[in-house]
Image (cartoon, coloured by chain):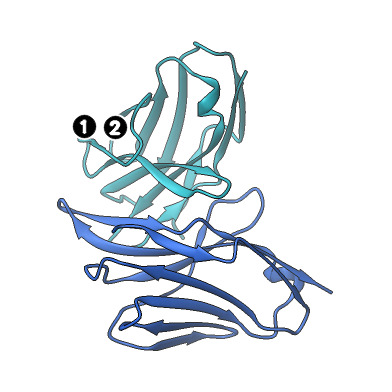
């Protein structure tokens, strides 16, 4: 079974802090994704990566950046956290058309 | 044009009943339609999926009905059980810009009462 792990289940940060969310997958997938999940809005794509050191903007990239230095690891960075970035963040990896999701990180920005 | 509209937002069903969740899309370039199931504290997991060349796919108690002309598809959960209580997301997929783009519906929170 594919396993996607995320570094934290819950995170509380202050406005203006730099925040790192880490994601690791163990299935050698080329593609990795970061989504945010908000009630009534479904899952919205922030960034994705189709190869090491490659990244592409998703639908809502503003206020976020990403890093992919190794194939199995994809990091989401909030350069200066704001309260409107309080959300559930989901990492996923994929082969072909499926998505394998991690358990999510619930981030609260105070 | 790339939206996927999902309804209802929430659903309460009695144990043994049928749960029905509906989705609609506009873009005919979509070629793969998965449903994801998410339990509290977990990430979404693929439940069942269909391609537009078939009108129905059944896996156990879960069935997808697909109407290509109406650009609609739905998930039916037969003999619903309390363990089916979860949030369900429909999605639609197509190749875009060299990668497989997946658009999610807003989600339906299903509660099955004993």
Q: Residue furthest top?
A: A16
Q: Position of residue B65 (x, y in %)?
A: 45, 84
| Label 1 residue SS | loop
Circle 1/circle 2 CB separation < 8 Å: yes
The location of residue A108, given as percent across then percent down, is 61, 26
Q: CA distance from mark 1 to mark 2?
A: 5 Å
The cyan-tinted chain is A
The answer to whether one can see residue B86 in this image is yes
What residue do we see at 50% from left, 48% from top? A41
Is residue A2 rendered to the left or right of residue A66?
right
Q: Chain of mark 1?
A: A
| The hue in which chain B appears in the rendered picture of the protein | blue
Q: Residue furthest left?
A: B98
In the image, residue A88 above or below residue B62: above
What residue sits 23% from the left and 35% below the top?
A55
Q: Quadrant of the C terminus of chain A?
A: top right
The image's mark for residue B1 is: none
Instruction: Name the disc covering residue A68, or none.
Output: 2
Q: Residue at x 52, y 56 (%)?
A: B44
Disc on res. A53? 1
Q: Secondary structure at mark 2?
A: strand
Q: Residue at x 60, y 51 (%)?
A: B42
B111 in relation to A63, above or below: below
Residue B23 drawn above or below residue A72: below
Between A58 and B68, which is closer to the camera in this rendering? B68
Q: Position of residue A30 (x, y in %)?
A: 26, 49
């Amino acid at each position: 079974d594919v396993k996607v792990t995320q570094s934290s289940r819950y995170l509380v940060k202050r406005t203006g802090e730099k925040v790192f969310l880490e994601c690791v997958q163990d299935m050698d997938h080329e593609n990795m994704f970061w989504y945010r999940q908000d009630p009534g809005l479904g899952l919205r794509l922030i960034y994705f990566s189709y190869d090491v050191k490659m990244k592409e903007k998703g639908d809502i990239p503003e206020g976020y950046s990403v890093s992919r230095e190794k194939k199995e690891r994809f990091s989401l960075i909030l350069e200066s956290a704001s309260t409107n970035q309080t959300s559930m963040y989901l990492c996923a990896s994929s082969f072909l058309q499926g998505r394998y999701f991690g358990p999510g990180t619930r981030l609260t920005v105070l | 044009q790339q939206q996927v509209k999902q309804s209802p937002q929430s659903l309460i069903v009695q144990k043994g009943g049928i749960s029905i969740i509906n989705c609609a899309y506009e873009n005919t370039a979509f070629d793969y339609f998965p449903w994801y199931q998410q339990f509290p504290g977990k990430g979404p997991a693929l439940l069942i999926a269909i391609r537009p060349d078939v009108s129905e796919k059944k896996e156990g108690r879960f069935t997808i009905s697909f109407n290509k002309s109406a650009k609609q598809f739905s998930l039916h959960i037969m003999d619903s059980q309390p363990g089916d209580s979860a949030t369900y997301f429909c999605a639609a997929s197509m190749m875009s810009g060299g990668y497989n783009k997946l658009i999610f519906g807003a989600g339906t929170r299903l509660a099955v009462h004993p």
